[in-house]
């Protein structure tokens, strides 16, 4: 069965001569087993009729946000879809998508869609190379959308160069590839920890750390994108996962995180421990706010928190994977290797606070994987989302070996 079987795809068509290829694209998507909802801009209807596309897709085609029969619900359509493709995407439509100018059904639906979005630009070569277009494309890439590259060759203007819309087969290939990848971890249950923990001193104060949870949240999202069933155990942070399928369990202290993890890891295949768990907590939690008193100082007695990673490592079965993090400031490799062995990880993701752009709060990270079999992989500075994808790829290759 092909990867497009049963998938719900929105095809947004804007006004370019390449719109004539949309009929073939629609037909091929339908043949591959997808359900296709066509949306068109008014300009697109000058190049190809809605009747052609509704006949091929066997569904009504929407052009306006409202019609005589009422309001065409772009929110429902956006939430219905597994993927959205804007093809052809004209310079104007790229600008509207980048800026969120929702004056038509294609852009309004784009803003409501939670699914991955692909765009296949089509325009003349000078329009394609114009800084304005470049900036709009860069914005869409930044939002996480995928560019289906333009082709090179004869253009409708008679000029020859870059700007042709990708052929329908190529566009279908991009979608197939996406859905294939999205099912690599289908049925795999994963537990991810992220964020700091807060260890209470009294009802208003706590001991904490600077973790924001970004890295672990990105991993939870990437695992869910790959089809895994993800439970994210998240310490106190204002951030949260994007992927609607991630089950979010918010906790405060190391103890709470420990209790959830012990329960959840028992029936998970993968554990990724990216939380910056406090190592110590106050021995006593005052149930009243602690008063300053006189001018004397004060000391707080601390005790160890449970080591979640080490506990899960002890119970780890043959078919289970456990991945940990090491954030180090010195003796990076030796420290990471020590943790890898002590906590029974399959591999450990090492990041050094000495690297510019790596560690707490940044959107980027520079990591090294150290595997239990001594293999090492060093990566460049990348976005945390890209690092998360590398981690997911490593997890997938371990699972296929198990
Ligand atoms: O704190 P430490 O550097 O030992 O953390 C290494 C790894 O162990 C990380 O993956 C972290 O999430 C995990 N850890 C844990 N429970 C603790 C301390 C650390 O799961 N109490």
Image: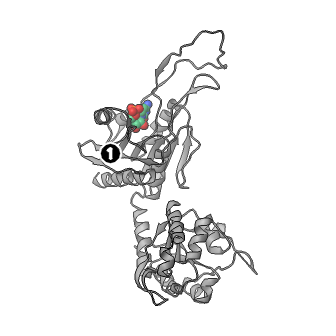
Q: Residue 100: image x %, image y %? A: 63, 66
Tally the marks.
Answer: 1
In the rendered image of this protein, does residue 222 appear above or below residue 355?
below
Could you tell me which quadrant the N terminus lies in?
A: bottom left
In the picture, measured across the screen, residue 69 lies left or right of residue 355, that is right
Q: Residues within 10 Å of mark 1 (few under 14, many from 20)?
A: some
In the rendered image of this protein, does residue 189 appear above or below residue 201?
below
Q: At x 62% / y 83%, what residue is drawn?
A: 43
Q: Residue 177: image x %, image y %? A: 40, 69
In the rendered image of this protein, does residue 167 appear above or below residue 269?
below
Callout 1: CB less than 8 Å from ligand 1: no
Residue labelled with disc 1:
368
Instruction: Give the SS element for disc 1.
Output: strand
In the rendered image of this protein, does residue 291 appear above or below residue 256?
above
In the picture, measured across the screen, residue 154 lies left or right of residue 296, that is left
Residue furthest to the left in view is: 374
**Colour theme:** one colour
Q: Residue 308: image x %, image y %? A: 43, 33
Q: At x 67% / y 19%, what residue is drawn?
A: 288
Q: At x 52% / y 18%, what residue is drawn?
A: 283
Quadrant holding ligand 1? top left
Can the viewer see residue 227 in this picture?
Answer: yes
Can the viewer see residue 7 in this picture?
Answer: no
Q: Residue 211: image x %, image y %? A: 50, 38
In the picture, measured across the screen, residue 151 lies left or right of residue 288, that is left
């Amino acid at each position: 069965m092909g990867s497009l079987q049963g998938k719900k795809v929105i095809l947004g068509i804007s006004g370019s001569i390449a719109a004539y290829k949309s009929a073939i694209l629609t037909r091929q998507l339908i043949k591959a087993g997808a359900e296709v909802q066509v949306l068109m801009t008014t300009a697109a209807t000058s190049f190809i009729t809605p009747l052609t596309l509704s006949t091929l897709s066997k569904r009504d085609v929407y052009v306006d946000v409202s019609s005589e029969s009422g309001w065409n619900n772009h929110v429902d359509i956006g939430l219905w879809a597994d993927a959205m493709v804007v093809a052809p995407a004209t310079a104007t439509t790229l600008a509207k998508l980048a800026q969120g100018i929702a004056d038509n059904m294609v852009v309004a639906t784009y803003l409501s869609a939670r699914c991955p979005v692909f765009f296949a630009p089509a325009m003349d070569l000078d329009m394609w190379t114009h800084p304005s277009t470049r900036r709009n494309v860069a914005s869409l890439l930044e939002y996480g959308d995928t560019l289906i590259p333009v082709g090179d060759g004869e253009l409708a203007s008679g000029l020859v160069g870059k700007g042709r819309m990708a052929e329908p087969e190529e566009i279908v290939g991009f979608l197939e590839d996406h859905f294939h990848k999205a099912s690599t971890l289908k049925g795999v249950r994963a537990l991810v920890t992220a964020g700091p923990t807060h260890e209470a001193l009294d009802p208003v104060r706590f001991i904490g750390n600077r973790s924001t949870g970004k890295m672990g949240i990105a991993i939870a999202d990437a695992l869910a994108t790959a089809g895994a069933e993800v439970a994210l155990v998240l310490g106190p942070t204002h951030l949260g996962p994007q992927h609607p399928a991630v089950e979010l369990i918010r906790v405060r202290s190391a103890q709470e995180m420990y209790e959830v993890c012990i329960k959840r890891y028992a029936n998970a295949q993968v554990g990724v421990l990216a939380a910056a768990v406090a190592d110590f907590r106050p021995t006593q939690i005052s149930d009243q706010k602690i008063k300053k008193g006189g001018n004397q100082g004060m000391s707080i007695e601390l005790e160890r928190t449970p080591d979640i990673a080490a506990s899960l490592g002890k119970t780890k079965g043959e078919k289970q994977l456990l991945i940990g993090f090491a954030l180090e400031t010195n003796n990076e490799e030796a420290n990471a290797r020590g943790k890898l062995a002590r906590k029974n990880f399959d591999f450990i993701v090492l990041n050094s606070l000495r690297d510019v752009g790596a560690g707490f709060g940044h959107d980027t990270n520079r990591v090294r994987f150290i595997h239990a079999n001594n293999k090492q992989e060093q990566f460049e500075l990348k976005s945390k989302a890209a690092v998360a994808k590398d981690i997911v790829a490593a997890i997938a290759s371990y699972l296929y070996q198990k």
